[in-house]
Image: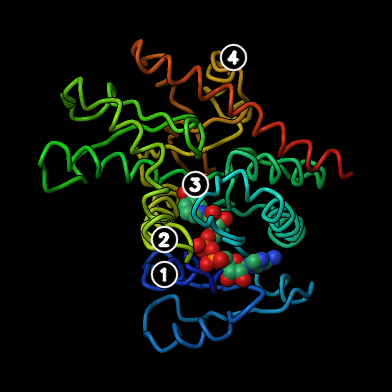
Amino acid sequence: MVKAVVLGAAGGIGQPLSLLCKMSPLIDVLSLFDVVNSPGVAADLSHIATKAGDFKGEQQETEDAKKAALSGADIVIIPAGVPRKPGMTRDDLFKINAGIVKDLIVACSKYCPKAFILVISNPVNSTVPIAAEVLKEAGVFDPKRLFGVTTLDVVRAENFVAELLNQKDSSKFNIPVVGGHSGNTIVPLFSQTQPSVDIPADKLDGLVHRVQFGGDEVVKAKDGAGSATLSMAYAGFRFAEALLKAAKGEKGIVEPTFVYLPGVEGGDAIAKATGCDYFAVPVELGPGGAEKAINIVSKANDYEKKLLDEATKALKTNIEAGVNFVKGAS
Ligand code: NAI
């Protein structure tokens, strides 16, 4: 039996993500939690007859509601928090989302300390270190089970390359996107694309910028009504599904994700090379979660090395902010 929990299930990402989870043959029990309207979302989804039938929507910020939602969870996906409005960066969300993520991870540490935890709430570069510090304080941190979801950057990179090269099917491209998940911390390694692609030199800067700031296109188009929700639900589910398949024993599944490198096999070398303990890299997934970090960063070409230099500078500050948020508070 696989129990999945969505925290922030009534939101723009939470609702379509919950729908995708409800439709997944890999999930037996689905539990939805939000501070508003989650019983409504659960009632709505309950009219769809699929395998993930035994589920409930828990509301209210009570300990009992969190306990009911999280107890026995195998995988917890967290899109709880506020999204960006035009003109905002992901770091502007820190003030509100840091506290929300901290509280929810405290609950995870009590009620499902062994679950895979997938953090979507922004700024991911800081909310993942926050989650790690909370789990460390509770004595239940397993770096192989904590993931910052950066799959949307990969999805965008694959799609934008397909668009540029007039290819209809973006799913045939495998593009590693490394670093973090905001602005110039997002580094697409086009030189490592499988199958290899030839990006015209005069298009490269624009393409990199589009991957780094693609989220702004959606924020602008939604004009105050939020940020990416449908593409994010798709990306979040793509990552969750990959992890659940790997947990069941399927081999050779690799997805980029933002992890605590020193706790993952192969991560030390990348941490040393980048000076960052947290970094998004392609990770081989397995029954224990993040089985192996793949050092694709060392294969970056000169152009990409410059991007990586800029990324690591910003990323270090973001990571420190997350760590200090928890350490300073305790
Ligand atoms: P939204 O505002 O539509 O939904 C957020 C939901 O979280 C709301 O239903 C709200 O009631 C709920 N919530 C707030 N505090 C909570 C708490 N303490 N416990 C449980 N639920 C709580 O926002 P949206 O568009 O769904 O975005 C959610 C987050 O995901 C934002 O931080 C956004 O920046 C981030 N995001 C991350 C992406 C990524 O690639 N990792 C991409 C797009 C958005």
Residue 149 bears which disc, if any?
A: 3
Of helix, strand and loop, which one carries label 3?
loop
Mark 1, residue position: 16
Q: CA distance from mark 4 to mark 3?
A: 22 Å
Mark 4, residue position: 272
Residue at 33 percent across and 13 percent down: it is 301
Q: CA distance from mark 4 to mark 2?
A: 33 Å
Disc 2, ligand 1: is the CB inside 8 Å? no
In the image, what residue type sits under mark 1? Answer: Pro
Q: CA distance from mark 1 to mark 2?
A: 6 Å
Mark 3 Cα-neighbour bin, 10 Å: few <14, some 14–19, many ≥20: many
The percent coordinates of residue 260 (x first, y second) are 61, 33
Mark 2, residue position: 233
For this rendering, which residue is in front, 206 or 279?
206
Disc 3, ligand 1: is the CB inside 8 Å? yes
Q: Are marks 3 and 1 in contact (CB under 8 Å)?
A: no
Residue at 39 percent across and 53 percent down: it is 235
Q: Are marks 1 and 2 in contact (CB under 8 Å)?
A: yes
